Structure formats: C-alpha cells, structure tokens
Amino acid sequence: MLIHELLPLVGDAQSVVEVSQSGDALRELLRAPAASAYRAYVPDGEKMDAGTVVVAFLGPKPEAHIDAETVAPALRELPVGGRALLLLGWPVPELPYHRLLDELVTAGLQVLQVVPLDKVSRHGAHCAVLAARVDRLAPLRTHLSDAPLDLAGEAPDLRALLRLTGEYVFGDLLSRPLRRNLAAAGDRIKEQDERIRALEKEIAARDATIAKAESRLARARNDLADLRASTTFRIGNTVVQGARRPTRGIVSVPVGLVRIWRKRGTPGERPGPQS
C-alpha cells in the first residue's frame, strides 16, 4: 500500500494532529485533504475530538523519527473515537512493536491494522499502524483490508476473543524458535565476516609476496637478457658450440669471433661482466 492511501483508511478525518514535527514532509506524504485541519501537536493545547487523527513517524533515527514515549501524550489525549496513524521506520523483522504496543494499550487504543508499505526507499516507512481509542473492542479487520475503519460495528464475541488469544499463544510458540534461529544466524554472519576479513588479509599478504617474486623474476630475466647480449657471453657461446662440433668449429669459431669483434660497441651492445 502507498502512504497517501492511508488517511482514507482511518475514515473521515476532520482534523489531523502531527507529533513528528517534520514540517510539511509528512503532510505531503499523507496528502492530507484540504478539508481536514492540519496542525502540530501542542501538549495540553487545543482539545481533540472523535474526528481527530494523530499522525507521527516513529523509527530508529533520532534526526528523522520520534520514539513511542514522545507520541504517548498525544495518544492519551485522544477521546473515544479518535484515531492514530503511525508510520514506522523499522524494517518489519526488527520492529520493537512491544514498546509501541505498551503506549497504545496504556492510552486505551486498539490496534486495528498494521499495513506494509510500498516504495520504502523513497520515504523510509516500512509499515503503518492504524489504531483507535475505544471503550469496547472494535470489529476485527482482515489483513490488508482497504475499507475505512468502522468502530461502531459489532464487537467480537467470546469465540472470536478465544481464537485471538489462542492464535497469540500458538504464534508466540512458533516465533520463539524463529527468533532464536535469527539470533544464531546473526552470530554466524559475524563469524563469517571475521573469517572473510582474515582471508582477505591472507590474500593481500600472498599478493604482496607474489608481487615481490614477480619483481625478482623480472629483474632476473633482464639480467639474463643482458648476459646473453654481452660480448663475453657471445664469445663463450661461440667457443662452446665449436667445441661440441669440432669439424665445423674449425671454421665457425673464427668466423663467429670475427663477427663479434666487428659488432662490438654498436648500439644495443651490452657490456659483459667486468673481471
């Protein structure tokens, strides 16, 4: 769901009270209707009525969000019928819902729906909580219902409440191993990160060793090239080749030595080792 689709869910909002103090940012995101009076929350200020919707952006970043304790006074000032629309900046798996739920219950609000939001990268809100101040249980809503809140409908009967409490108990039973697995996975990720950093250091050390070896090899190749191009090496090589084939060496050795003598001192000639 998109953020601007949230306000219609809470019903006919006669006034919207913002606790987040975001300037016009939150108002523009919500696209508050012109017919609704939009104002910032002032403690013990203008009295709220049943047509009031308290809006706020809660999350982990103090520079962009507020916490549950900050929005709590405004929630407590809501009369029966008043509603709250709270954007949450935590990723759903990391949501500390218990802190927010404590404040909502203390203020007498019933959580009616929690809506996942689209386009998180644009605004940073992962989900939104729709709640209302009640003096009796409001009708239950289905997941992702897009009908406006109806607080005047038939309250859940005993069977519905029994099912809710049973689902909570079973849900908690199933979620505990998942939370443990998540914590264990986090520990394994940390260990893997440390191992990766250690391997990166080893690879860097090996790369440095290889670079040094390649540098020594390059110098050795240059020295070998210098040696092969030197007059001393060429003379020695000519004599050795002649010794291997004496019959041809009688002619090839003198000829080779003469060629070397003629080419001495020419450009590209490399001097042999000095004795």
Image: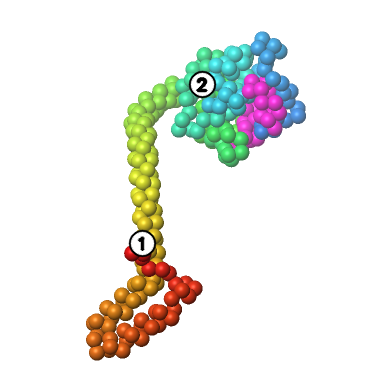
Q: Is residue 7 magenta?
A: yes
Tell me the mark number nearer the camera, choosing from 2 and 1.
1
Q: Which residues are magenta?
A: 1-28
- Residue 30 covered by magenta stretch: no
The quarter in which the C terminus is drawn is bottom left
In the foreground, 240 or 113 = 240
Q: Which quadrant of the view contains residue 6?
A: top right
User: Element at badge 2?
Assistant: helix
Quarter location, residue 11: top right
Reply above or below: 220 against 107: below
Mark sitting on residue 100: 2
Q: Which of 88 and 66 lies nearest the eye of the viewer?
A: 66
Place of residue 200 in the rendered image (x, y in percent of width and height, measured from the top left) = 38, 44
Residue 265, image x and y in percent? Answer: 46, 74
Q: Type of residue at label 1?
A: Ala
Q: CA distance from mark 2 to mark 1?
A: 72 Å
Q: Position of residue 205 (x, y in %)?
A: 36, 46
Q: Amino acid at mark 2?
A: Leu
Dot label at residue 220: 1
Look at the image and tell me whether residue 3 can be seen.
yes
Residue 107 drawn above or below residue 263: above
Quadrant assignment, res 260 = bottom left
Tell me the SS state at disc 1. Answer: helix
Against 128, residue 242 (above or below) is below
The structure residue drawn at horizontal position 56% and vertical position 27%, both measured from the top left corner, is 61
Residue extending farthest right: 34
**Above or below: residue 139 compared with residue 220:** above
Graded by Cα atoms within 10 Å as few (under 14), some (14 to 19) or many (20 or more), the crowding at tag 1 reads few
Which quadrant is home to the N terminus? top right
- Which residue is at 71% across, 13% downward? 46
